[in-house]
Image (spheres, rainbow, N blue to C red):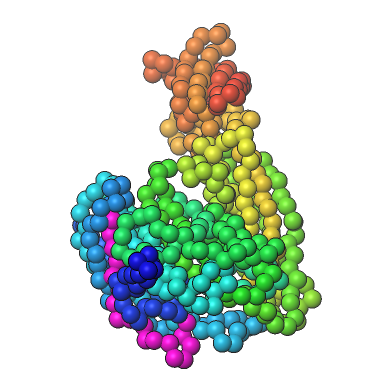
Amino acid sequence: MKKALVRILTLLLPCLFTSPANATHVVGGQIEYTWLSGMDYEFQVTFYRDCNPGNASMPLSTTLCFFDKVTNIQYSTLTLNIVNDDTLSLGDACYTPTGLCVERGVFKGTITMTANPNGYYIIYSLCCRNNIITNISNPGSVGMTWYAEMPDPALQNSSPKFGSYPNAYLCNSVNNLQDLSANDVNGDVLTYSIVDPWDDNGCVAAPYPVVPYAPGYSLANLLGGTSTLSINPTTGMLSAYPVNAGVFVISIRVEEYRNNVKIGEIRRDMQYSVLNCTTGSTPVLSLNQPNIVDTIIGGKNHCFQVKLNAINVSGADLLTLIGASPELASPSENLPTVTFVYDTTRTPDSIIANVCVNAPCHSIRTNPYYVTYYGIDSSCAGIDTAMILYTFYVVPPGDLENPPNIITPNGDALNDFFSLTKENDLCFDHFNIDIYNRWGNHIYESEDYAFRWDGKTKTGNNVSNGVYYYIINAGFMENTYQFTGFVHVNQ
């Protein structure tokens, strides 16, 4: 009897900590924060709830709990007040679900933080989840813990911010693609993963209990059966192919890296209904190249075109080409930048886009980079997609640009200097140029790739008109190069 009483109190205490109106119908949410000035921060909690008739009203306030990230000692609490309450539209031109409605509540509050090299983590704990969830055992008695981490407040960092809440449903037995990416105003590197949703435990320090999965479900199989579910770690693009109708809970984690060190994270708890959608005529999308393999010289740009087509569809389709930076092998990698230039050429049923890669010297490596980019017909909730895997290698420069073979260093700003290039962006660990006259006398030397020889000797005297011979020795990593040539001087 005593054990049963303890269990009842354990279940009740987290619910008593939160507002009673929060008790059920919450389908997801997250914590985010923004640096204001000095040590002042604004925190925001976003609720997503069922908005079916008969549900309790949205609460007027919420309370966050702050803990030291290393010692787990509680630092503070903060009450946030509601600033917005609205209803989200679901569906698209092809399919609008019935009986599915999501209400959004936004709560905000400010706090003056204390500098702390350990950083903090922040939680919001509430009870309970909907009783119709498929992948959780006894879901009506299972709560939620929403979580965020922040570095030392003295860093004046703002957390990543999630985009708008996606359609709260997935279509059964088709490919679904949804953008769950976040934006970071500080320009930090973000990585995405699917993690265990957490049960509630009240305003207490970590760790937090994982939800009790129903038989046959786990983090590795959140949708059950032979369903597939994954998120691109770089783009935040969720890909799902469910095979069972039902209601499923997942949690998305966004980790934030600066200077190759993790400084924080945010999480979004989400509930998806898998529906047997009726979409009518389904477009078939194709891309002009299913897979591309390229070799790019470090320090250079490379561009190519991608064409996306919608086949056998009447009327205009909402076509988009989506891609991102190469996928990270680890957050500490220095990456090339892949830029997508949209709408180069567009028709109702096709789009041509330029894809450009900028591969700086520090991205040279033996292993390839991989970029996944997608063509989406967003008129049908991303059901219809095409995918290309772009593989490219970044290699050291195998040659130098041809330098001018004649200079006239007379001060008229025309051909006054001998140099290799106007761009100081090729990749060398070491570089050396020596210039000799026709009798083999050493006239000039430099270890600067961006050198400019003005036709003078090492002592500053003008050389005589004539032909001069140069030798360049350069290297990058294990690669070494030697180049020779002539330059004619006409003072």
- Image side of residue 459 versus residue 180, left or right: left
Question: What residue is rendered at 37% in x and 65% in y?
Answer: 3
Tell me if residue 122 comes above or below residue 460 in the rendering: below
Residue 307 visible: no
- Examine the image and state in which quarter residue 243 appears: bottom right
Residue 85, percent across and down? Answer: 37, 82
Residue 429 vertical placement versus 46 (above, below): above
Residue 186 in the figure: left or right of residue 251: left
Q: Who's the residue at 63% across and 58% down the image?
A: 373
Vertical relation: 290 (above or below) 451: below
Q: Nearer the viewer, residue 69 or 5?
A: 5
Location of the N terminus (image quadrant): bottom left
Q: x, y (%) of residue 398?
A: 64, 30
Residues in magenta, as a range: 49-67
Q: Is residue 64 magenta?
A: yes
Q: How many marks?
A: 0
Percent across and percent down for residue 141 are 45, 73
Is 235 included in the stretch rendered in magenta?
A: no
Name the residue nearer the viewer: 286 or 17: 17
Residue plotted at (57% across, 49% down)? 327
Q: Depth check: 300 or 114 in front?
A: 114
User: Among all residues in the image, which is located at the extreme right?
Assistant: 312
Residue 434 x/y as whole percent: 51, 17
Query: In this view, which residue lies farthest toward the bottom?
Result: 53
Residue 411 in view (yes/no): yes
Q: Which residue is located at x 51 percent, y 77 percent?
A: 131
Taking depth in this image into account, of 487 and 388 the one nearest to the observer is 388
